[in-house]
Image (cartoon, grey):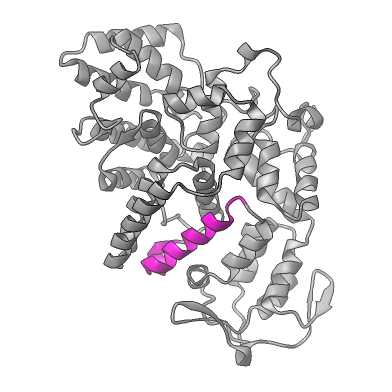
Amino acid sequence: MKSGQTNIDPEWAWSAYQPEQPEDWTQRQVAHFYRRCGFAANPEMLQSGLQKSPLQLASEQISNRQESPQVEKVSASLARSVLATADAKNLPAWWTHRLLNTSVPLLEKMTLFWHGHFATGAEKVKDAQLMFDQNQILREHALGNFGSLVHAISQDPAMLIYLDSASNRKVHPNENFAREIMELFVLGEGNYSEKDIRELARCFTGWEIRRDQFYFNRFQHDFDEKIIFNDTGTFTGEQGVDLVLKQPAGAEFIVGKLMQFFIADEGLQHPELIQPLASQFRDSGLETGALLETMLSSNLFYSDYAMGRKIRSPVDFAIGLLNSFEGTTNLLELNRGLDELGQRLFYPPNVKGWEGGRNWINSSTLLARANLMQSLLVRDETRFGGGSLSQYCKTHGVTSLQEAVDWFVEILLAVPLSEPKHSELVQRCEHGSGSFENNLRRGLGLIVSLPEYQLA
C-alpha cells in the first residue's frame, strides 16, 4: 500500500449501509450510532433504534433540530439562574444538564464539535452572557450551513474578544482573527499565504464591540483595495469571509475534521476517502446536515474501521454512562471531575480546542476517570431512572449480579470483552460484601474503569 493511500474503496465507504438480513442489524450497531451521534443511549432508545434502518436513524437525528418544549423550558430557567450570577464558571453545569436531558442528541453533539472547532475560552472572555450567546449561535447553526455559521461566529463578541479583535483599527489591523479563520476555522494550515492574512486583516478593520454587541465603525475601516487569494477589490469583512469560504481546500479540511470526530481518531485521513464527501459538501453549498447524513449512515461508519476506533472524551465518558441508564447526579461535582480529566466546557485549553484522541489518555487521566466514576457512584444523590440502580435494573428484568454484568457490558462497551475478563468481573461482583445495590454500583464502577470502556 502506497504512502497516503488506503485500500478502502471510497464508493463502498460512502454508500449507505444496508444490512443483508434483519439479524445483521444489531443493538451493538445502534449503540455505536448513539455513542458517536450523541452521548450514548438508554435501553428504550436502543430498542427503538433497532426498529429503524441505518439511514432512517441518521435522517431523523439530522432533521430533528428542535429541542423538546419541556427540556427547553427547564434549560432556559437554569440559564437565567446561571446568568444572574454573572459568573461564567457556572456555565458548564448548565450545559451538562442539557446534555443529560436533550431530546436532540446529535444537535448537542455537533454544538460540542463546533465549540472545540471555534474554540473560545471563558477564562479570557469572562463574560458569562457572551459565552452563553456564542453557545446558542453554535447550536442554531450546528446542523445547518457552514458558511452561515462562519459569518455568525466572525461577528460574535466572545470570539472577537478571545482573538483580540474587539477593536480593530485601520492604522494597525489585528491579524489574529484573519489567521485563525484560515488556519483553524475554514482552510487548514498551508492553504493560504502570509500576505493573504495581512490583506484579510484589513477587511476586518472597523469591527468593534459596543454595549456587548458587534458594531461596525466605518471611520476605522480600511476602504482601500486589497488582494486576497489573487482576487482584487475593496473588500469588506463579510466579503473577506466569503473569499475564504469559496477556497476549495475548505471542504476537505472540514470533512477531515468531521471524519475524525465521528468515525475514527486515526488512520482514515486519506485524500481519496475525503474527496467524495468534500465534493458533496461543496456542491451542496456547504450544508452540514446533508454531509452528515451520508457520513453517519455509511458502510464505513458501521465498519470495523470505525467501531471502537475512538477514545471517549471526558464528556462522552461520563455523560455516556449516565445517559445509558437514565442517570442523574450532582452536576457541580461532575464538572469538577471533567475539569480534572481535561475537558472543562466553555474553557478549551487554547484556540486549537481539545486535541482529542490519544491525548485524552495517560496514566494520570486513567486514574482520574476511575476516581470520578467512583465518587459519583457512591453518592446517594446519583440516581438511575429517578431511583436506585437496583430498582432500575429490576424494571428491565435484571435481578442477579451475573445478569447485571452481562447487561452493563452489552450496553456500555463498544468492543467485545474477553471471556476471562467477563468471568472475573462477575466473580468480583458476587464476592463483594454489601447490599445488592452497592455490589451493582461497584460492578458498574469496575466496568467503566476497564480499558475497553475508554473506547467508543
Q: Residue at x 36, y 28 (%)?
A: 325
x, y (%) of residue 85? Answer: 27, 65
Residue 191 in the magenta stretch? The answer is no
Between 218 and 272, which is closer to the camera in this rendering?
218
Q: Is residue 449 visible?
A: no
Q: Is residue 439 left or right of residue 258?
A: left
Q: Nearer the viewer, residue 132 or 442?
A: 132
Does the magenta portion include 142? Answer: yes
- Magenta span dominant secondary structure: helix
Decide: is 188 above or below 34: below
The relative height of residue 407 versus residue 221 in the rendered view (above or below) is above
| Residue lying furthest left | 434
The picture places residue 320, in percent across and down from the top left corner, at 42, 34
The residue at the point 58 percent across, 56 percent down is 141
Image quadrant holding the N terminus, namely top right
How many numbered circles does the render carry? 0
**Residue stretch in magenta:** 121-143
Question: Would you say 104 lies left or right of 324 here?
Answer: right
Residue under the image location 30 percent in, 25 percent down:
445
Residue drawn where x is 66% and y is 42% of the image: 292
Foreground residue, 436 or 427? 436
**Quadrant of residue 310 within the rendered picture:** top right
Quadrant of the rendered structure where residue 173 is? bottom right
Q: Does residue 331 show up?
A: yes
Give how far across and how far down residue 103 sits, in percent. Answer: 46, 41
